[in-house]
Image (cartoon, rainbow, N blue to C red):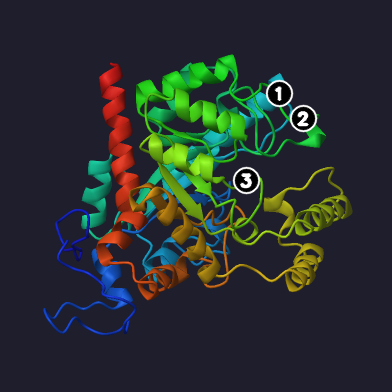
């Protein structure tokens, strides 16, 4: 029989607390409870709300998640690092909004949906798929890992509102309204010149975008405002009849990248009853204005040398020219660390309250900081929170409790709309 774990958040362990920043490897002398980081991970459900996948996951043996893959996340790394669960991501980058562009985006999205479900079908003893918070908790308490799905870039629905329900039925429980580049739903925080984007196209959310939000609310699909422009983000948050999620964003006051959220935005998410998942992506944790253009130039040079017009991370990121080029750039601009990452968490907790903050890596989509650069290093994040005096109950909220509570609030809002 599979070993079962008792996870904080599923049962009441409020009496457990980490007092101060003491020895992480000691036991509580008063009640004999092991308060080491490893033991905390046995009791707390850890959830990463944004893990990208390779489009060949489960289709190519190299990307078999049941083996040791070149990816930052696979089942073995999750088991090593104590990462219990993830929203695996159906991501499709923005391209020209043409019939061919829409068709290819849909095709790529369906392949990724299939890949995620194939993972849980191939390894049912190691990971299960959750469509609801209750299913999530049931799987986690069995000792297995938990998978669910988020969509990154509403472009994948094309102009078809009915596709939202179809993708919901395939397991998608949140959708990022836009990615890099404007789409038919709303404006992006990062317009793409190569697509002819101006600074804004819709002035925030489009007329179609409001219909998309209505349908997401009706179904119980979380509205994800990461990647969107400030106007889109504020309009969507105010309009949505359910609380919103920022699935992978940082704090603008600490790192002034346009993808990060300013204080007004952070407060708006909290006021809606939503959660901001603080992202451990180096460029959002520590921002160097000159670094981005240098990386963009390198990527274009690598793509050109490979005979391609545009950068394709799946194809080009392992090429020697890119690897060496990034080594030089990273040496010039020191990477963010777990400590820098938790600085963002501290800021958000202090500004909007601990009930509205979560954690996310964006692994295999650019994510990672020194000390948390794969799922195998997940315990380092918990260790840093212990060091700063977060209690076990607080750690449980930040790792998963807040997000699961949000998921339930969104489901309740959907029921009220029926």
The quadrant the C terminus occupies is top left
Q: CA distance from mark 3 to mark 2?
A: 17 Å
Give the side of residue 286 with respect to residue 110, left or right.
Answer: right
The residue tagged 3 is 259
The quadrant the N terminus occupies is bottom left
The one nearer the camera, 60 or 292, is: 292
The residue tagged 1 is 201
Give the side of residue 218 with respect to residue 157, left or right.
Answer: left
Q: Which mark is residue 347?
A: none
Q: Residue shown at 75%/31% (left/top)? A: 199
Q: Residue shown at 54%/41% (left/top)? A: 226
Front disc: 3 or 2: 3
Give the side of residue 183 with respect to residue 394, left or right.
Answer: right
**Where on the picture, by quarter, is residue 200?**
top right
Q: Position of residue 340 (x, y in %)?
A: 55, 67
Label 3 element class: loop
The residue tagged 2 is 197
The one nearer the camera, 13 or 153, is: 13
Q: CA distance from mark 3 to mark 1?
A: 18 Å
Tell me if mark 2 has few (under 14), some (14-19) or many (20+) residues whose alpha carbon lies within 10 angstroms of its own: some
The one nearer the camera, 183 or 290, is: 290
Q: Residue shown at 39%/36% (left/top)? A: 271
Q: Residue shown at 82%/65% (left/top)? A: 321
């Amino acid at each position: 029989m599979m070993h079962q774990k008792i996870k904080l958040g599923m049962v009441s362990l409020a009496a457990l607390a980490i007092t101060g920043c003491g020895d992480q490897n000691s036991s509580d002398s008063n009640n004999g409870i092991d308060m080491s980081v490893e033991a905390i991970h046995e009791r707390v459900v850890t959830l990463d709300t944004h893990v990208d996948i390779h489009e060949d996951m489960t289709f190519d043996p190299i990307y078999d998640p049941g083996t040791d893959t070149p990816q930052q996340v696979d089942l073995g790394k999750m088991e090593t690092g104590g990462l219990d669960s993830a929203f695996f991501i159906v991501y499709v980058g923005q391209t020209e909004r043409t019939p061919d562009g829409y068709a290819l985006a849909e095709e790529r999205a369906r392949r990724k949906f299939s890949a995620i479900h194939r993972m849980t079908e191939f390894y049912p003893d190691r990971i299960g798929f959750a469509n609801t918070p209750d299913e999530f908790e049931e799987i986690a308490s069995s000792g297995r890992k938990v998978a669910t799905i988020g969509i990154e870039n509403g472009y994948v629905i094309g102009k078809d509102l009915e596709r939202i329900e179809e993708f919901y039925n395939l397991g998608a429980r949140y959708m990022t309204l836009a990615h890099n580049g404007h789409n038919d739903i709303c404006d992006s925080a990062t317009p793409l010149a190569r697509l002819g984007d101006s600074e804004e196209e819709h002035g925030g959310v489009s007329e179609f975008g409001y219909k998309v939000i209505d349908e997401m609310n009706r179904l119980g699909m979380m509205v994800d405002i990461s990647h969107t422009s400030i106007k889109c983000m504020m309009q969507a948050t105010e309009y949505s009849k359910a609380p919103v999620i920022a699935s992978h964003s940082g704090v603008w006051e600490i790192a002034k990248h346009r993808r990060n959220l300013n204080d007004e935005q952070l407060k708006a998410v909290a006021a809606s009853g939503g959660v901001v998942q603080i992202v451990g992506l180096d460029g959002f944790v520590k921002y160097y204005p000159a670094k981005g253009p240098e990386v963009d130039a390198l990527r274009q040079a690598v793509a050109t040398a490979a005979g391609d017009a545009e950068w394709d991370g799946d194809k080009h990121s392992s090429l020697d020219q890119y690897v060496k080029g990034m080594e030089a750039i990273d040496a010039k601009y020191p990477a963010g660390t777990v400590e820098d990452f938790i600085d963002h968490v501290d800021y958000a907790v202090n500004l909007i309250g601990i009930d509205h903050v979560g954690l996310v890596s964006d692994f295999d989509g650019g994510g990672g900081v020194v000390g948390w650069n794969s799922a195998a290093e997940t315990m380092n994040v918990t260790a840093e929170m212990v060091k700063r005096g977060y209690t076990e109950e607080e750690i449980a909220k930040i790792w998963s409790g807040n997000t699961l509570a949000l998921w339930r609030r969104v489901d309740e809002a959907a029921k009220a709309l029926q």
